[in-house]
Image: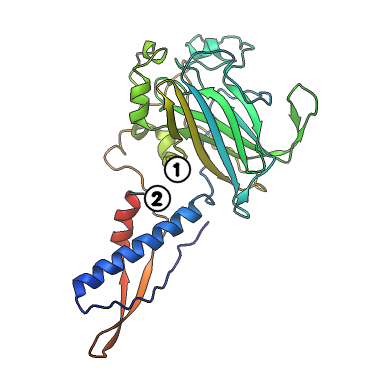
């Protein structure tokens, strides 16, 4: 847990006009505090989220599409070890998500509401990738689809300390899971994606982030994938995940039902007040020297100011 930082600034303005001084102080503080938050935000432990009902072991491979249709997405996941704020090299990122119309491989029948169905051997949109020297794991996939009761999302785990098989089977053994979580997407972008084929054939009422219980409980705003639209039908995405490489956190239980096996009701209690993560409280102490030689100490707690400008980050 990162404690709230306390910052002391020494500000000696060259004017005796109080309005100019306050303007100078606010600008100075906002600039410094924003740099501080940007520098530290990548070293914050990312909240866990439920694994969900459709996890299945996969193999190590970058391209997980298996020819399935959808908007191509090259997804780069940067993994930071919060023990030392350094890239986590050689970890395995385990990724899985539904296809463009809400179907999970290995659970195709169950995804379509067929009860007591036998699992299939399909593996589309499942795979693992090793983080490189910069702590980045890269996948070639598609912009995920959605299903009733859940916002658009991708599941992931981070495995640490495992042994990767040297043959072409792409398997691993041992190690432990240091993180289980979910990635989310901007609703406005997903609105646009929903108009395009093959997504447009899936005509259910889509659950938005503000209506998703898991998005709320896992502070999903910190794992929204940043998307670059290379073209109308080709995207790149980046996201940073902070994990404690030595930890073996308990699984987050409950809260998610997959497509076809019952759905979570939308959470409408938090629609009017989106979640905010206030990461710091800043106390500013300034020494004010006037032309008359008067010296005073002014201590200002700018909680409201920090809240407002954090909303803009």
Q: Quadrant of residue 202?
A: top left
Label 2 close to label 1 by CB (< 8 Å):
yes
Q: Left or right of 7: which side holds 47?
A: right
Q: Quadrant of residue 216?
A: top left
SS at badge 1: helix
Q: Left or right of 299: which side holds 76?
A: right
Choose between 264 and 39: the one closer to the eye. 39
Residue 72 x/y as whole percent: 49, 21
The residue sitting at 65% across, 38% down in the picture is 131
Residue 227 x/y as whole percent: 44, 33
The residue sitting at 73% across, 25% down in the picture is 170
Furthest residue in direction bottom, as rendered: 293
Choose between 106 and 252: the one closer to the eye. 106
SS at badge 2: loop
Label 2 crowd (10 A; few <14 / some 14-19 / many >=20)? few
| Residue 159 position (above or below residue 60) | below
Residue 133 in sight from this viewpoint: yes
From the image, tell me which residue sits under label 2. Answer: 277
Q: Quadrant of residue 186?
A: top left
Residue 24 x/y as whole percent: 28, 68
From the image, tell me which residue sits under label 1. Answer: 222
């Amino acid at each position: 847990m990162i404690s709230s930082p306390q910052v002391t600034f020494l500000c000696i303005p060259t004017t005796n006009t109080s309005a100019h001084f306050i303007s100078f102080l606010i600008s100075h503080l906002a600039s410094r505090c924003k740099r501080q938050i940007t520098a530290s935000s990548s070293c914050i432990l990312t909240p866990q989220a439920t694994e969900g009902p459709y996890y299945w072991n996969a193999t190590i491979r970058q391209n997980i599409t298996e020819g399935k249709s959808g908007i191509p997405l090259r997804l780069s996941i940067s993994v930071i070890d919060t023990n030392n704020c350094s890239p986590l090299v050689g970890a395995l990122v385990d990724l899985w998500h539904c296809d463009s119309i809400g179907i999970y491989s290995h659970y195709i029948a169950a995804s379509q509401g067929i009860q007591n169905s036998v699992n299939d051997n399909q593996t589309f949109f499942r795979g693992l990738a090793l983080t490189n020297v910069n702590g980045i794991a890269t996948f070639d996939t598609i912009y995920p689809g959605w299903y009733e009761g859940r916002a658009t999302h991708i599941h992931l785990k981070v495995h640490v300390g495992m042994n990767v098989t040297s043959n072409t089977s792409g398997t691993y053994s041992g190690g432990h899971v240091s993180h289980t979580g979910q990635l989310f997407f901007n609703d406005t972008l997903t609105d646009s994606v929903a108009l395009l084929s093959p997504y447009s054939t899936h005509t259910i009422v889509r659950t938005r982030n503000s209506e998703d219980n898991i998005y709320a409980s896992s502070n999903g705003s910190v794992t929204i994938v940043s998307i670059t639209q290379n073209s109308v039908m080709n995207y790149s995405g980046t996201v940073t995940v902070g994990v404690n490489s030595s930890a073996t956190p308990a699984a987050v239980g409950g809260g998610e039902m997959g497509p076809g096996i019952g759905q979570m009701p939308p959470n409408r209690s938090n629609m009017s007040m989106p979640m905010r993560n206030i990461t710091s409280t800043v106390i500013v102490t300034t020494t004010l020297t006037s032309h008359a030689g008067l010296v005073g100490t002014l201590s200002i707690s700018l909680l409201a100011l920090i809240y407002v400008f954090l909303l803009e980050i």
